[in-house]
Amino acid sequence: MSRQFITEAVMVAIYGQLLAPPAPVEYIVPYTTVLELYEFQVSPDPLMDNPADDQHVKSKINEIISYFEEPLNKKKIERALSVPWAKSPSILFGDQVSIAIINAVDTAQYGEYFDPIETELLLTSQRLSIPILTDQVELIARIIESSAPVQVFDIDDFDFAMDEEPLDQV
C-alpha cells in the first residue's frame, strides 16, 4: 500500500525528491493547485532565487502540465471535475509515484486564517484523513496555531513522513 499526502502541484515540480521516494506514494492534489501551474508557467516573476534553479523549476512545471494534458490523464482529471470532492483515478509518474486530482471545494471554513488554496488543503486532509506535505513554514505554524485537526509535514522531513504511520492507524 502506498503512503498518501495532500500537497500542491507546484511542490511536486519544485522538489525532485517527491518524484523519487523511497517507497510507493500517492499525492492527492487539489485541482486549483493544478490551475496555479498555468499561472506560474506564464508569470514573469521568478519562483526561485537562483536563475538556473528558476529555469529548472519552470521546465518541470511545463513537463507536469504537458503530462496532465495527455489525453488519458486529461480524461481522468475531467472525470473528477464533474462532482464536488470527486477524486480522479491515479495518474502514474513512474514506478513509485502516482497523483490523484481532487475537486476540492473551498467552503471558507478557515477563511480568517487561510487563503482559499490553503483551505482546500486543510479540508481535503480532514476529509480523507491524509497528512499535508508543504514547504511553507508559515502555513505549518498557522495550522498548529489554529488547532486544525490535520497532520502536517514539512517537505524537509519527507523521508521521516514516509516512515510515519498515518494517524488513523496509530
Image (cartoon, rainbow, N blue to C red):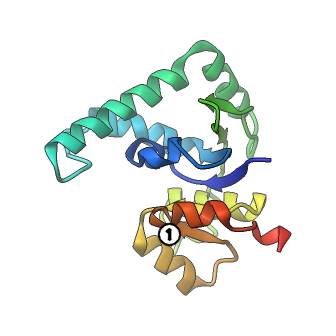
Q: Residue at x 73, y 27 (%)?
A: 79
1 vs 7, nearest the viewer: 1
Q: Is residue 58 visible?
A: yes
**Where 77 falls versus 46 (above or below)?**
above
130 vs 113, nearest the viewer: 130
Q: Amino acid at mark 1?
A: Phe
**Where 34 falls versus 138 (above or below)?**
above
State the image quarter where residue 137 is shown: bottom left
Q: Is residue 123 visible?
A: no
**Where 101 falls versus 145 (above or below)?**
above
Left or right: 17 in relation to 94: left
32 vs 97, nearest the viewer: 97
**Numbered marks: total:** 1
**Residue most extreme to the right:** 169
**Disc 1, SS:** loop
**Residue most extreme to the front:** 22
**Residue most extreme to the top:** 71
Q: Position of residue 78 (x, y in %)?
A: 66, 26
Quadrant holding the C terminus: bottom right
Q: Residue at x 46, y 71 (%)?
A: 139
Q: Position of residue 14 (x, y in %)?
A: 38, 46
Q: Residue at x 46, y 30 (%)?
A: 64
Q: Position of residue 99 (x, y in %)?
A: 63, 38
Residue density around tag 1, few if under 14, some if 14–19, many if 20 or more, within 10 Å: some
49 vs 88, nearest the viewer: 49
Q: Position of residue 74 (x, y in %)?
A: 61, 21
Q: Which residue is denoted by mark 1 in the rendering?
A: 114
